[in-house]
Image: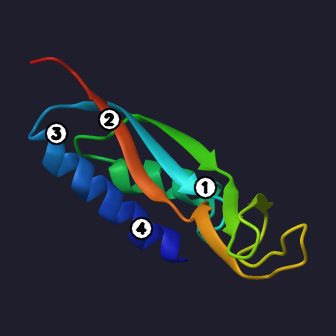
């Protein structure tokens, strides 16, 4: 499960940015096309965060839908898979959203 390694990286980044302060909430953006299972991240987060600055922190996950622009007609289309087809029939799509994995925000306790 690659989500464990991803979660370990997320926790390490947040702990570094927290600079010793207790983290109470972390918000992630995960694209629907990113091949990352949000529920697996949620499970791993609780395990990886134990005993550190994120222990007990709330994890919020915003799932970003897949969107692409057709390179032939310019239309924007929704994507539910990495590959798709425009209404004009073209498969030449430039993905715009859906592949994200971002730490959107974190909340820390005041010192």
Indicate the colouring scheme. Answer: rainbow
Which residue is under mark 3? Answer: 18
Q: What residue did someone put label 2 on?
A: 106
Nearer to us in this view, 50 or 64: 64
Q: Residue at x 76, y 69 (%)?
A: 73
Residue contact at pointers 4 and 2, CB within 8 angstroms? no
Q: Quadrant of the N terminus?
A: bottom right
Q: x%, y% of residue 96?
A: 58, 62
Q: Label 4 vs label 2: CA separation?
A: 17 Å
Q: Which residue is mark 1?
A: 38
* Mark number displayed over residue 6: 4
Secondary structure type for disc 1:
helix
> How busy is the neighbourhood of tag 1: few (under 14 within 10 Å), some, or many (20 plus)?
some
Going by the image, does 93 lie left or right of 57?
Answer: right
* Distance in Å between CA atoms under marks 3 and 1: 23 Å
Left-right relation of 77 to 50: right
Instruction: Classify the position of the C terminus by image quarter.
Output: top left
Secondary structure at numbered mark 2: strand
Of pointers 3 and 1, the one earlier in the residue sequence: 3
**Is tag 4's residue or tag 2's residue first in the polypeptide sequence?**
4
Residue placed furthest toward the bottom: 91
For residue 22, which quarter of the picture?
Answer: top left
Is there a contact, CB below 8 Å, between mark 4 and mark 3? no
Along the line of sight, which residue is nearer the eye, 90 or 8? 90
Q: First in sequence: mark 4 or mark 1?
A: 4
Q: Residue at x 68, y 64 (%)?
A: 68
Dot 2 or dot 3, earlier in sequence:
3
């Amino acid at each position: 499960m690659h989500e464990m390694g991803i979660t370990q990286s997320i926790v390490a980044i947040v702990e570094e940015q927290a600079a010793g302060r207790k983290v109470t909430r972390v918000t992630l953006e995960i694209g629907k096309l990113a091949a990352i299972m949000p529920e697996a991240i949620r499970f791993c987060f609780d395990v990886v965060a134990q005993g550190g600055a994120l222990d007990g922190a709330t994890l919020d996950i915003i799932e970003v839908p897949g969107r692409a622009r057709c390179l032939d007609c310019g239309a924007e289309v929704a994507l539910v898979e990495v590959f798709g087809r425009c209404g004009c029939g073209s498969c030449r799509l430039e993905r715009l959203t859906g592949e994200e994995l971002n730490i959107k925000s974190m909340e820390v306790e005041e010192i």
